[in-house]
Image (cartoon, coloured by chain):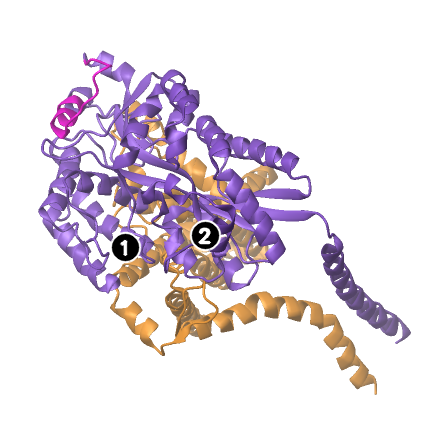
Amino acid sequence: MKKKEDILAATIYLLPSVIVFGLFNIFPVLYSGYLSFNRWDGLSRTGKFIGLQNYSNIIKSIEFWNSLGVTFYYTAGITFFGIAAGLFIALLLNRRFPGRTIFRTIYFIPVVTSTIAAAIVWKYLFDPGSGYINIFLRFFHIPGPDWLTSTTWAMPVLISLGVWKRLGFNIVIYLAGLQSISPEYYEVAEVDGAGPVTRFFRITLPLISPITAMLVIMSLIDSFLVFDQVFVMTNGGPLYSTDVIGLLLYRNAFRYFKLGYASSIGMIIFLVIFLITFLQRRFLSIGEQSSW
Amino acid sequence: MNIKRVILLSAVTFLLSVYSFAEGTKEEAGKEGGKINLEFWNYWQGKNAEVLKALITEYEKQKPNVTINNVYIGWGELLPKLQTASAGGKMPDIAAVDLVWMPKLVRSKTLVKLDPFIEKSGVNMKDFYPETLRVSRYESAYYSLPVSTNNLELFYNKDMFKKAGLDAEKPPVTWGELVSHARKLTIRDGSQSGMEVFTQPGEGLTWQAQVYIWQTGADFLNSSNSAPAFNSDGGEKAIGFLVDLIRKYKVAPLAKWGLFGQGKAAMVMDGSWMVGIWAESAPFNWGTARVPIPADGKPATNMGGEQIFIGKTTPKAEAAAWNFIRWLTGKDAQLKWDMETGFMPVRDSVAEDSTYKEWITKKEPRLLPFAVNQKYAHSRPPITNYPEVSDIFSKNVEKAFYGKVTVREALTSAANEIAPMLK
């Protein structure tokens, strides 16, 4: 009797969030999966079932492979620099010095800044003529490039914005991790004569490796889905050198009205992220076990 | 246990009340009766939006039982929003959209066919410029009316002309003069370029390039829109000219659009809508001229603008919406609209009106080149996949701008990609 009522109560309590989650997350994903087997222009009521044709068209398209490469470039840049810089700054902020809460706040501000606003500011900063970056470089007689219209520099600029935006989050998580390490480890190591470098590589790094793994996965997923700052700053140009996969999907869905095709791009993104996460979890968990 | 029951009960009541509340509002909306609310979606902002609001207020005074709710939606979001609205059966009563979107929208079957209304109200369709009606028609019926139009002509910075020792009242007329002027106007440290060319991917590049193609006598697509036509001698000459400006003479940089307005380029081809904007904001003296043409070429320009249509709703709302769009596209409202915003007339009777003519020569003569060239304006091909065709064209031409491929290679590759899409 009691059990039955508990189940009923649980169902009713969960219902609102299940409905909201189902309606706005689960259903669209499933529907998008269904759409990926159709040709649909988004304006008419129904589409036409075409089987796997969308997928085979994607695999044959040069644009898709270009976008995939560009997205990996972006993702690798964000993940590497975001995590390296995040850990470095977290280590600095983990010491006792006056005003360190202020620094923590400052580093966290970009995380809560609107991406679009930041992207617009970035565009001004990197303006070849009147942007502060090139004015600064000119001061040292270095001719700055036309950042956002150069096939070499446009992507690094986008990565710099992405790292700037993510950094605060990485720092906060790392700080929490660093503070959970018991100071006794360091004290013992110091007694044994371990220098700061040894202490970092032998104690800090292994003990926060689960946090690193989590940050890497989150960073991979987030940056793989990048859209807004690229849309604002380069719109994929020049010469499609920043045409990330999110942009390719958007263009096909909302400019060309190829909703089936765009859905299958979405499904492929899902598969790629799933695969990366799966492999990484496996790889990392094996690594953890053998190193202890 | 008892507390659990109380919470359970309150949760259920809460859910039920939310449900009944939603029901209630729906009923109330239906009861309003006499007064008609029309929702009007468009992307006009700034001065254009102010003028539109004034016109709407004027209309509402004439028709006290009609309220028009003017909804601004950004250019980039309006089409996706209409797409959702159309698929979900919740079309706005009225929308004014970029004419390029019309071929796609008319096929959605959620636009109201205007022919019965046109017949009943006796609208003289011959008064509209025929090119502005090309996208309004589908399967020999009208689905929209042109509400504004514009075209591209040359803008030049008079201060820079004077500084370079050029006559500020004699802008270039031919491509040759454009090059020689641009070379004199370019300062090699990168602070000032002679000409601004649209070099980044997308429709901006395509619709600018089309002007140069048409000037040579070539076309973008063939006359039945069934095959590319830009991969011709004329097309090659036109794109070759732009590539030369960038790579050979180095008078146009590979840069983000907007240099002329920032005072970093001496000349640019831009739309008539910029006359009003720069008249207020440009911190330099500038003039306009018809776009320079090749020595053996002919005048041409590209036509932009907005089409206004009625979404399928209820017969009563549709009739009220018709009355409004008929009024807004009518001569009186158009006269005010064009003179206040600087849009080009869509009606011959407006262009020929003495008030309009007097206004343009006295008040804003910089609009004259646009008005003169409106009759040479081409409209872009009314095909459904135009946005994709345009992107493919721009992607390939951009490669030529960046010197990665030759002009011929770029156009051939674009044509090969586009040809199967037109079948």
Residue at 20 percent across and 51 percent down: it is B396
Tell me where residue B22 sits by quadrant: bottom right
Q: Which residue is mark 1?
A: B389
Residue sitting nearer the eye, B407 or B108:
B108
User: Is residue B409 visible to us here?
Assistant: yes
Q: Identify which residue is drawn at 62% across, 54% down.
A: B316
Amino acid type at mark 1: Val
Start and end of the magenta stretch? B166-181
Residue A224's disc number: none
Q: Quadrant of the N terminus of chain A?
A: bottom right
How far separated are the C-alphas under marks 2 and 1? Answer: 17 Å
Residue B344 against residue B38 in the figure, above or below: above
**In-image side of B114 versus A235 (left or right):** right
**Towards the viewer: A96 or B351:** B351
Chain letter for the purple part = B
Q: From where the camera sits, is residue A195 visible?
A: no
